[in-house]
Image (cartoon, grey):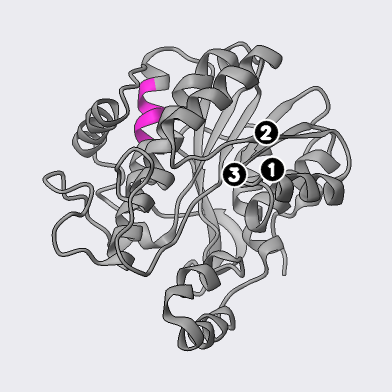
Amino acid sequence: MAGWTADRIPDQHGRIAVVTGANSGLGLVTATELARHGARVVLAVRNTAAGAEAARRIGGDVEVRELDLASLESVRAFAAGLTADHPVVDLLVNNAGVVLLGPRRTSADGFELQFGTNMLGPFALTGLLLGAMSAAPEPRVVSLSSITHKSAHLDFDDLMYERDYRAARAYGRSKLATTVFGIELDRRLRAAGSPVVSALAHPGLTRTNLTPRAWEHRGRPGQVIARLGLLATQSVERGALPQLRAATEPGVRGGQFFGPGGLFETRGRVVEARLSREATDPAVGKRLWSAAEELTGDSYL
């Protein structure tokens, strides 16, 4: 299959790259390729033991740091420690995410868990690292979207989905929010004259451990559903290519969005993907940004 591959990643020596959720799946592949091309990669993970095992597998110049995006306290502690040791950060890949198809759960801060982990945690983390990133020569933030954002709608009267909870819809909303954030971040960075580029990517349908975990609440029937679902997916190595391209290709513009180009954007070679109308609506972006500031207590740009 022709198209962009990891072999086209330019030399990354001298760059500090932070990859959230880097101990497995898309994050592990992304961290591995960045390290293989010379970057010093910070594996930002909830489970540091799993992170240490990932670091052993990756080799190269990597370090493991604890980060739980479902806890703003953890986000702030991570950012403070990272910027103390690395005053300049070149790349942030907001890869980590959670998919839950069971009952509604909340984060350490009381947010609906998918919304808190997939959007609010990365929102706070990005703001806390912007100073260090602004000091880099070609800084970039990559936000990981999903094709589910296209059919989702944000309900600003119930962002935490406290009424009539539907887990799959809550996931789609969280990924729409992530996408809106990446686009609004680009608008604000440009308006501020910042050198930081905000790009986005989605992996299509990819074979990761998120799918089995999403169905674990259903026991053995859930295991069967998860295995059948995996048959429709592409490999994690292919699924990681859109975010690797967004993270490393020279000349990527703010607001560019990459994803698979085949079979309704579920698989195939990496192309510029299509964003939903709501994802690119400036009024929605402004409103979500204000809500995120209020919910997290973090204000920037």
Q: Picture coordinates of residue 149 (x, y %)?
A: 35, 57
Quarter of the image for the C terminus: give it.
top left
Instruction: Give the amino acid at mark 3.
Output: Arg
Q: Does the magenta stretch include residue 87?
A: no
Pointer 2 residue: 65
> Along the polypeptide, which appears first: circle 3 or circle 2?
3
* Numbered tag placed on residue 48 in the rendering: 1
The Cα–Cα distance between marks 3 and 1, rounded to whole angstroms, is 6 Å
User: Magenta segment, which residues?
Assistant: 183-188
Q: Name the residue under label 3.
A: 46
Which type of secondary structure does the marked residue at label 3 adopt? Answer: loop
Q: Which SS class for mark 1? A: helix
The 10 Å Cα crowd at callout 3, few under 14, some 14 to 19, many 20 or more, is: many
Spatial distance from mark 2 to mark 1, Cα to Cα?
A: 7 Å
Give x and y (percent) for residue 109. 34, 37
Asked whether the beta carbons under mark 2 and mark 1 sit within 8 Å of each other, the answer is yes
The question of residue 186 being in magenta is answered with yes
Is 75 placed above or below 88 here? Answer: below
The disc labelled 1 sits on which kind of residue? Thr
Say whether disc 2 or disc 1 marks the residue closer to the N-terminus: 1
Q: What residue type is labelled 2?
A: Arg
Task: Using the rendered image of the protein, determine whether residue 87 is visible from the camera's viewpoint.
Answer: no
What residue is at 81 percent from the left and 22 percent from the top?
14
Main SS of the magenta segment?
helix
